[in-house]
Amino acid sequence: HIGPLSSDEPGISFGPGVVLFFRDLTSARRLEAMRADFVANASHELRTPLASLLGFIETLQGPARDDPKARERFLDIMRGQAQRMKRLIDDLLSLSRIEMRAHVAPTGIVDLRTIASQMVETLSPLARERGVAIHSRLPDHAVPVLGDRDELLRVLENLIENAAKYGESGGRVDVELAHLAGSDREAQPRVMLSVQDYGPGIAPEHLPRLTERFYRVDVAQSRDKGGTGLGLAIVKHIVNRHRGHLDISSEPGQGARFSVILPEAQGHD
Ligand code: ADP
């Protein structure tokens, strides 16, 4: 007989004693492989600065023991490595907190215009130090969405920081918030928050992979700039939790544009 053999396991019985059960092993295996990969990547990322710290400690206890100049220099490098480990652990914790809430949509009303103007004000001085001016184009009224204020601030922080870091040579970053014109009258109104830079941009083959954990176009460059490779993965998880969509486009040589599209909360101002 062919058919369900128990309430939760579909299968086929070929007479007494012989039963085949089917389960979606491919997707279970893929998930397991992704998890193992993630743990291997995270361990490797932590191991590198840790190995360097241990090396410097040994040097300080040995050959450099009585060399005050070398001590100062090594301690500076060690502080940098420890800060890198801390950034990585903070990002890993953020990602896991957001993942734990993945299936719970946020219910608070948040004004995206306030979020955008706050973050632009916070990051402008740092960007200016890099020679980057942040320009914003925001509506003159509130733009309410159902969201988590801290998470949405984080999204914008990561996107503007990336634009200032990688698009530094462009000298300018544009932050724009606008209503999206819907073609369908029934469709829920949506808003778009975008961050555009005018740096070197990103080659098309990298675009689909940018939000993967630890994916970087240039690992050495990302490390130099203090990156952990988790920023865009965090952005994507937050946007997904907000029932939104992240759109990335780039003309190599002309810059990159990261747009977050969210459903607008209705009946609130
Ligand atoms: P990271 O910590 O390395 O910045 P992210 O997840 O934020 O990690 O970004 C992943 C990679 O995407 C970066 O290492 C960089 O190669 C690329 N990237 C992100 N934003 C930009 C941008 N505005 N211009 C060019 N490349 C970018």
Image: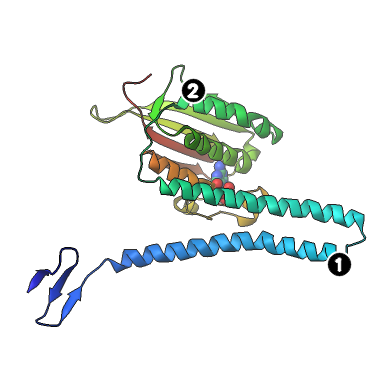
In which quadrant of the rendered image does the C terminus lie? Answer: top left
For badge 2, the amino acid type reads Leu
What residue sits 49% from the left and 46% below the top?
234
In which quadrant of the rendered image does the N terminus lie? Answer: bottom left
Where is mark 1, residue-wise? 62
Marks 1 and 2: CB-CB under 8 Å? no
Where's residue 191, x and y in %? 39, 29
Where's residue 223, x and y in %? 65, 53
For badge 1, the amino acid type reads Gly
Q: Nearer the viewer, residue 167 or 58?
A: 58
How many residues crowd around disc 2 within 10 Å: few (fewer than 14), some, or many (20 or more)? Answer: some
Would you say 77 lies left or right of 9 here?
A: right
Q: Nearer the viewer, residue 216 or 19?
A: 19
Picture colour scheme: rainbow
Q: Nearer the viewer, residue 198 or 91?
A: 91
Circle 1 SS class: loop
How many residues crowd around disc 1 within 10 Å: few (fewer than 14), some, or many (20 or more)? Answer: few
Q: Is residue 169 above or below residue 35?
A: above
Nearer to us: label 1 or label 2? 1
Circle nearer the N terminus (1, 2): 1
Q: Is residue 61 above or below residue 107?
A: below
For the view shown, which residue lies furthest in the front direction?
A: 7
What residue sits 45% from the left and 32% below the top?
193
What residue sits 64% from the left and 54% below the top?
85
Where is mark 2, residue-wise? 138
Quadrant of residue 42 in the image?
bottom right
- C-alpha gap between disc 1 and disc 2: 58 Å
Where's residue 11, x and y in %? 16, 71
| Residue 201 appears anywhere in the view | no
Q: Which mark is residue 82?
A: none
Where's residue 192, x and y in %? 42, 31
